[in-house]
Amino acid sequence: MRTLLRGGRVVDPAGGFDGVADVLVTGGEVSAVGPGLTPEPGTVVLDVTGLVVGPGFVDLHSHAQSVAGQRLQAMDGVTTALELEAGAMPLERAYADAAEAGRPLNYGFSASWGAARAKVLAGIEPDSRIESALAVLGNPQWQRSSSRKELAAWLSLLDGELAEGALGIGVLMGYAPFSDPAEFLAVARLAANAGVPTYTHVRELVEVDPAIPVDGSEEIAVAAAETGAAMHHCHVNSTSGRHIERVLGTLDRSRREGSRVTVEAYPYGAGSTAVGAAFIEPERLRMKGLGPSSVVMLESGERVADEARLRELRSADPGAPCVLEFFDERVPADRAMLLESLAYPDAIVASDAMPVFWADGRRESTEWPLPPGGSTHPRTAGTFARALRLMVRETGTWTWLEAFRRCSYLPARVLDDVAPAARRKGRLDVGADADLVVLDPATITDTATYTDPTRPSVGVRHLFVAGVPVVGDGELRVDAFPGRPVRGEPR
Ligand SMILES: [Zn+2]
């Protein structure tokens, strides 16, 4: 199959090109880029004059591993959606399930530190599903430090998952915040030896809890310096809150000293997690300057009234998803802090997309438009279009070239070492994977809100995954499942 995208503004963050050109897609590859390309007979020609053509967004942080979730992400410009922070175990099952159900977007998983620990420390058999992983988070049994024997046991589980092709190691350190820092160093060493990155939800910051064994962001800097591992700092906006400037300073220093530290952010002032998470304990909320009313339950929409109610919810169903408001997006100073995390040099846009679920318990839907009443965090549907609206359209902080560097090029480069196939992603030159987004630079915007979180973004006119249209003329193609696995190649 051949498609010619004619007359668009082509943006290639790899070569620094931004200009009007045609793009020819042959099979799953970009086969030509240049002015005035002549199509052979049988080529589908799309006039994309006035639209921006760039490499599709590579999302390093998506828990929305379902057809429903991926379709929302497709409408947001994403062509590759990876579950790297939590990871999945057993890895083989996660890949097999995705392949069997079919995926509109490329997919992939890291080895799950949380699941490996829960298996060894609490005897919980992992089933590779995010719902099960969320349900385990609040269980104190897996949060303790490991004995030497236990440490060896779960490190070896992770090592096995890397050999199967995991894209690195996902570390939910913030959910076991008092575990021994020596264990994190051991994980970093394992990653460095295997030549794979780690993706960490960091522990609490020392400003928030002086009793924490080590400051969450400093821990990344120290481990990266000591082991040489490539270490990715997840959602710096949500884990740093009002201490964003100090945290970015810590990461800056570490990067200047040559450590391989990368960082991501999403453009929302509220996070989302399971209500049983360690950092939603009433005492810990107080330390952050937050209270029970910063927590809103996703399923019921209930804003938590007081500490007694919060404790009740945490013990009744610790896996229940909720929203945690760490900024007030209506307050200009809070908005400025949010934008600061995105504006940080080389900060990658990543969504932390959450699963979509319905009141009757369904966690998947192949209907489109999605059935009404779906619950999730609006970042699932809107992260990338919102980042483009805020950072390009409204504030002019990023050029389009810079936007594609943050959304496509830099995230793909995080994967280069572990998955050599990623080298063809995040770029738009001859030989690149034909994972492409064609968007309207004048109208691109998010429309999802906290109360109506599954409204798709607007402005993505066409989206190709491996050369196959997933969005055409702004409409999702319900029969498109071209998503391919992205896998690590063990060293
Ligand atoms: Zn997280």
Image (cartoon, rainbow, N blue to C red):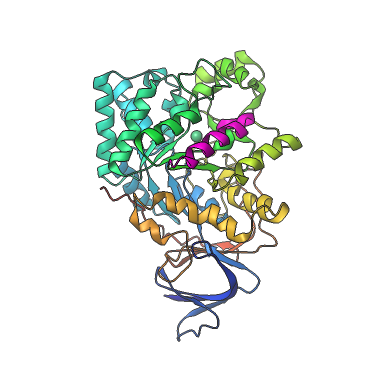
Quadrant hosting residue 449:
top right
Question: Farthest residue toward the front?
Answer: 257
The main secondary structure of the magenta stretch is helix
* Magenta-span inclusion, residue 256: yes
Of the pair 429 and 93, the residue shown nearer to us: 429
Q: Which residues are magenta?
A: 239-259
* Magenta-span inclusion, residue 207: no
Residue 110 position in % (x across, y down): 37, 42
Q: Is residue 21 left or right of residue 132?
A: right
Residue 404 position in % (x across, y down): 55, 58
Residue 417 position in % (x across, y down): 35, 51
Quadrant hosting residue 258:
top left
Say above or below: 264 vs 278.
Answer: below
Q: How many marks?
A: 0
Question: Farthest residue toward the top?
Answer: 308
Say above or below: 369 vs 232.
Answer: below
Residue 255 position in % (x across, y down): 48, 41
- The residue positioned 27% from the left and 22% from the top of the image is 150
Of the pair 174 and 398, the residue shown nearer to us: 398
Q: Quadrant of the N terminus?
A: bottom left
- The residue positioned 54% from the left and 16% from the top of the image is 210
Is residue 160 in sight in this rendering? yes
Is residue 353 in sight in this rendering? no
